[in-house]
Amino acid sequence: MCLGGLKHVRKDANGQVGEIISRVERRRKWKAEQKVKIFTEVLKPGTTVSAVADRNGIRRSQLYAWKKLAQRGRIPGISLNGSKSRCLPSSY
């Protein structure tokens, strides 16, 4: 996820315009409380994974990864029964 970036437009010796995009990417660390809040939002009726991910600035794949962790009991505060989840299907 690009969390910031700079765009530079430059001309070379022949007058050709080129564009250099430099990105700053970092890996975010989520507290269990944040995961629970976001994951709970996904489980609300009528909510889509895409909408929740967009609202929180994360990728959909992150929510699916959290689902797997929750199924294994590795996220405190989230408990899923087997692979049953209304909003996060096991086969996407």
Image: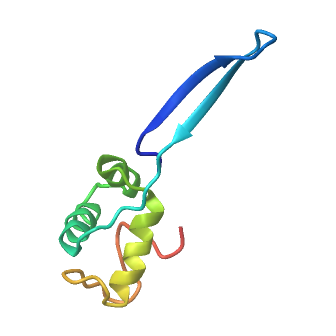
**Residue at far top of view:** 15
Q: Looking at the image, which residue is at 47% across and 64% down?
A: 61
Q: Looking at the image, which residue is at 27% across and 67% down?
A: 39
Q: How many marks?
A: 0
Q: Is residue 52 left or right of residue 40?
A: right
Q: Is residue 23 left or right of residue 76?
A: right
Percent across and percent down for residue 38 are 25, 62
Q: Is residue 50 left or right of residue 9?
A: left
Q: Looking at the image, which residue is at 76% across and 9% down?
A: 15
Percent across and percent down for residue 14 are 81, 11
Q: Is residue 50 left or right of residue 76?
A: right
- Is 30 in front, or is 86? 30
**Residue at far front of view:** 13
| Picture quadrant of residue 13 | top right
Percent across and percent down for residue 25 are 47, 51
Q: How is the structure coloured here? A: rainbow
Percent across and percent down for residue 53 are 36, 54
- Is 71 in front, or is 48? 71
**Does 19 sit above or below residue 75?**
above
**Residue at far right of view:** 14
- Is 10 in front, or is 48? 10
**Does 80 sit above or below residue 41?**
below
Q: Looking at the image, which residue is at 22% across and 75% down?
A: 32
**Does 83 sit above or below residue 48?**
below
